[in-house]
Image (cartoon, grey):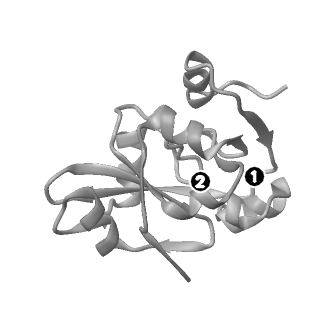
C-alpha cells in the first residue's frame, strides 16, 4: 500500500483523480529519465519540478519534461522577471518541504507560482513527483494545472 503524501492529500481535497506509482529509489539515479524507465512511462510524460528564484517575484517553480532542460530566459519572460536562476540545492528542502528527487509542484510548504512547459498539453496523462523519492503521481495535465494554478509556456529546450 502506498503511503499518502501531502501532495496526494491535497489532490484528494480537490477531488482530483490520480494514480500513485511506487518505484525503487537509487541515489545515483534520481533523474526523470531513470524514473520514467522504472515506472514504465514514456519520458515525454514524466515531468520534473525545479525550484527557481526571480529577481522580481522571488521563488517560483517550473515543471518541464524529464528529458528537457529549463530555459531560464524563457522562464524569466513568462514569469515577469528580468532574470531567473535555479536555487542552490541546500535551499530546496527549506523552501518547499521536499528533498531533491522528490519535489512536487503540489503541496509545497508555501504556495509558489508554477510555470509548466507547454508540451504538457500534448500528453493525456502526466507523471510528477508525489512529494517523496520513490513515488510518482499520474494525473491529467488539466487537473495538475487546476490543482496548482500553473501557467503554461515554452520554458524548456531539448538537451
Check the picture and name the quadrant holding the N terminus: top right
Residue 101 image label: 2
Coordinates of residue 52 in the picture (x, y in percent): 33, 58
Coordinates of residue 87 in the picture (x, y in percent): 33, 59
Indicate the quadrant where residue 47 lies: bottom right
Residue 25 image label: 1
Residue beneath the point at 81% across and 58% down: 41
Mark 2, other Cα within 10 Å: few <14 / some 14–19 / many ≥20 = many
Q: Check the image and name the residue furthest to the top.
A: 13
Q: Which of marks 2 and 1 is nearer the N terminus?
A: 1
Residue beneath the point at 59% across and 53% down: 101
**Residue 68 visible, this orientation:** yes
Coordinates of residue 31 in the picture (x, y in percent): 65, 65
Residue beneath the point at 42% across and 44% down: 150
Q: What element carries label 1?
A: loop
Residue beneath the point at 19% across and 50% down: 57
Residue 154 image label: none
**Residue 28 visible, this orientation:** no
| Residues at marks 2 and 1 touching, judged by CB atoms closer than 8 Å | yes
Q: In this view, does 69 lie to the left or right of 37?
A: left
Q: Is residue 4 left or right of residue 59?
A: right
Vertical placement of residue 110 versus 68, above or below: above
Amino acid at each position: 500500500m502506498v503511503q499518502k503524501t501531502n501532495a496526494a492529500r491535497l489532490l484528494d481535497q480537490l477531488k482530483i483523480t490520480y494514480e500513485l506509482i511506487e518505484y525503487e529509489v537509487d541515489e545515483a539515479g534520481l533523474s526523470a529519465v531513470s524514473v520514467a524507465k522504472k515506472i514504465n512511462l514514456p519520458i515525454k510524460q514524466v515531468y520534473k519540478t525545479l525550484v527557481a528564484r526571480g529577481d522580481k517575484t522571488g521563488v517560483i517553480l517550473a515543471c518541464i519534461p524529464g528529458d528537457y532542460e529549463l530555459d531560464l530566459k524563457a522562464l524569466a519572460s513568462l514569469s515577469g522577471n528580468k532574470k531567473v536562476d535555479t536555487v542552490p540545492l541546500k535551499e530546496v528542502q527549506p523552501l518547499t518541504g521536499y528533498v531533491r528527487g522528490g519535489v512536487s509542484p503540489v503541496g509545497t510548504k508555501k504556495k509558489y507560482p508554477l510555470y509548466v512547459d507547454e508540451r504538457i498539453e500534448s500528453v493525456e496523462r502526466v507523471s510528477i513527483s508525489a512529494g517523496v523519492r520513490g513515488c510518482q503521481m499520474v494525473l491529467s495535465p488539466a487537473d495538475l494545472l487546476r490543482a496548482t494554478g500553473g501557467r503554461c509556456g515554452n520554458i524548456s529546450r531539448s538537451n
